[in-house]
Image (tube, rainbow, N blue to C red):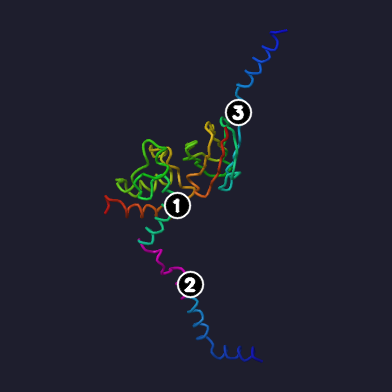
């Protein structure tokens, strides 16, 4: 009986009720497709990039990104001081993705293209730009 | 009869000071892990690092007993390191920070 009553109510309500449901569903879809989350901002990209840096790059480039990581003593020349780098963002993305050897730099800079996503590479470059003395 | 014991003693002394044959140990890298977490070798032994993953690894160590960086190498490739001094050698991968292997190099 209850189900019948519900069906009758829906039938009486007709199109407006269906449109209401559809409208709410559309709103959910729209908000999911374009979430208003912090990840959309440049600050969020820099923050994510700092996490990538401290997980992967810090061993050689050091916590201050100045090339004084704990592994730096293995290399001559030393790992790059990224806070004083004069390279542009495109160059930085390329050397991170393809490694030092592909860019005629140190063969000990690994190619990260298989490990990091394009977004992670963009994020770490955003972080490095934010701490670079030359660009601030 | 006198020369024989003397010759035997000489031969035994030479054998005693001859170096024993160095061994080679194989450590595979698969699924972003080393195939073992701990390895015990003798000084002079070789450890061969074989990459069985479909992506690059970069094995290195910063330990006093043995510091090295094998650089990046891809699937199917291998690099070797001679553990020439006794001590503890902590082996890592530069690309995969969670990878870790402890090698104990004995005298």
Indicate whether A75 appears above or below A29: above
Q: Position of residue B94 (x, y in %)?
A: 47, 44
Residue at which label 2 appears: A29
Q: Residue drawn at (40%, 66%), measured in percent from left and top?
A: A38
The quadrant of the image that shows the C terminus of chain A is: bottom left
Which of A41 and A34 lies nearest the eye of the viewer? Answer: A41
**Pointers 3 and 1 in contact (CB under 8 A)?**
no
Task: Give the magenta-colored segment's residue range.
Answer: A27-42
Q: CA distance from mark 3 to mark 2?
A: 66 Å
Per the rendering, the mark at residue B22 is 3
CA distance for labels 3 and 1:
37 Å
Which callout, 3 or 2, points to the residue nearer the camera? 3
Residue A30, given in percent of the width and then of the height, sits at 45, 72
A57 and A44: which is toward the camera: A57
Q: Are marks 1 and 2 on the same chain?
A: yes
Q: CA distance from mark 1 to mark 2?
A: 34 Å
Q: Chain of mark 2?
A: A
- Residue B19, horizontal then vertical, whole percent: 60, 24
């Amino acid at each position: 009986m209850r189900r019948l009553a519900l069906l009758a109510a829906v039938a009486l309500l007709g199109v407006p009720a269906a449109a209401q449901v559809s409208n709410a569903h559309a709103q959910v879809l729209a908000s999911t497709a374009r979430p208003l989350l912090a990840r959309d901002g440049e600050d969020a990209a820099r923050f994510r990039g700092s996490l990538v840096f401290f997980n992967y790059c810090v061993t050689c480039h050091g916590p201050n990104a100045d090339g004084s990581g704990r592994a730096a003593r293995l290399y001559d020349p030393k790992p790059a001081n990224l806070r004083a780098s004069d390279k542009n963002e495109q160059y930085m993305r390329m050397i991170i993705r393809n490694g030092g050897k592909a860019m005629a730099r140190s063969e000990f800079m690994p190619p990260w293209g298989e490990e990091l996503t394009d977004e992670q590479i963009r994020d770490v470059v955003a972080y490095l730009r934010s701490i670079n003395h030359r660009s601030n | 009869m006198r020369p024989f014991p003397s010759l035997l003693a000489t031969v035994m002394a030479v054998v005693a000071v001859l170096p024993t044959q160095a061994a080679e140990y194989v450590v595979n890298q698969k699924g972003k892990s080393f195939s073992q977490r701990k390895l015990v070798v003798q000084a002079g032994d070789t450890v061969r690092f074989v990459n069985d993953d479909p992506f690059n690894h970069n094995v290195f160590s910063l330990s006093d007993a043995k510091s090295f960086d094998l650089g990046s190498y891809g699937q199917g490739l291998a690099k070797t390191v001679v553990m020439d001094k006794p001590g503890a050698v902590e082996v890592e991968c530069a690309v995969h920070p969670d990878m870790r292997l402890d090698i104990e190099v004995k005298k």
